[in-house]
Amino acid sequence: MSIKSNIRREKDNETKVVLKNLRVSPQKLNLVLGMIRRQKADVALSKLQFSKKRISKDVEKALKSVISNAENNHSLDIDKLFIKEAFVGKGIVMKRFHARARGRGARILKPFSHLTIILSEEMEEKNGSKD
């Protein structure tokens, strides 16, 4: 009577990575993810390496992690991998206080984000093949 293990929610040709509590606003992170959505994995890596955005280093690290997981854990071909989905979730918001003139205060909001990248392996097309 052992506890059943969690079932895998992704398809057999997919793999996923989730980064939580990244210290960047969801809007800024979505700009970086917009560059790499629906791209091949190697093209997306090169775009992230040459991006000037600060958060692109963390996204690149996550993408390298999910590529290695796809190769080692799920036996997927890394040459056929592409980014099926890349989306942002809103995390916590730290609220800070900034003193202003005449005894007033101003709010400073420091948002956090959650990042999810889903890689998928391209299926070979069988129609139109020449033998």
Image: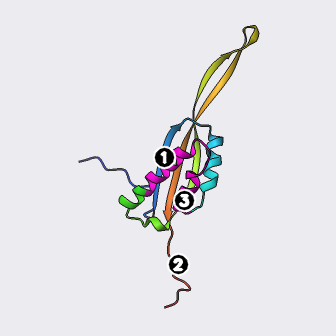
Crowding at mark 1 (Cα within 10 Å: few <14, some 14-19, many 20+): some
Residue 115 within the segment the image draws in magenta: no
Say which mark, if any, is on residue 125.
Answer: 2
Q: CA distance from mark 3 to mark 2?
A: 19 Å
Amino acid identity at mark 1? Val
Please provide the residue range marked out in magenta.
40-67
Quick check: can you spot residue 10? no
Amino acid identity at mark 2? Glu
Q: Residue at x 50, y 76 (%)?
A: 124
User: Label 2 near label 3: C-beta < 8 Å?
Assistant: no
Circle nearer the N terminus (2, 1): 1
Circle nearer the N terminus (3, 1): 1
Q: At which x and y percent is residue 34?
A: 64, 52
Q: Nearer the viewer, residue 47 or 130?
A: 47
Q: At which x and y percent is residue 103?
A: 72, 8
- The quadrant in which residue 110 appears is top right
Q: Residue at x 52, y 61 (%)?
A: 42
Q: Residue at x 51, y 82 (%)?
A: 126
Badge count: 3
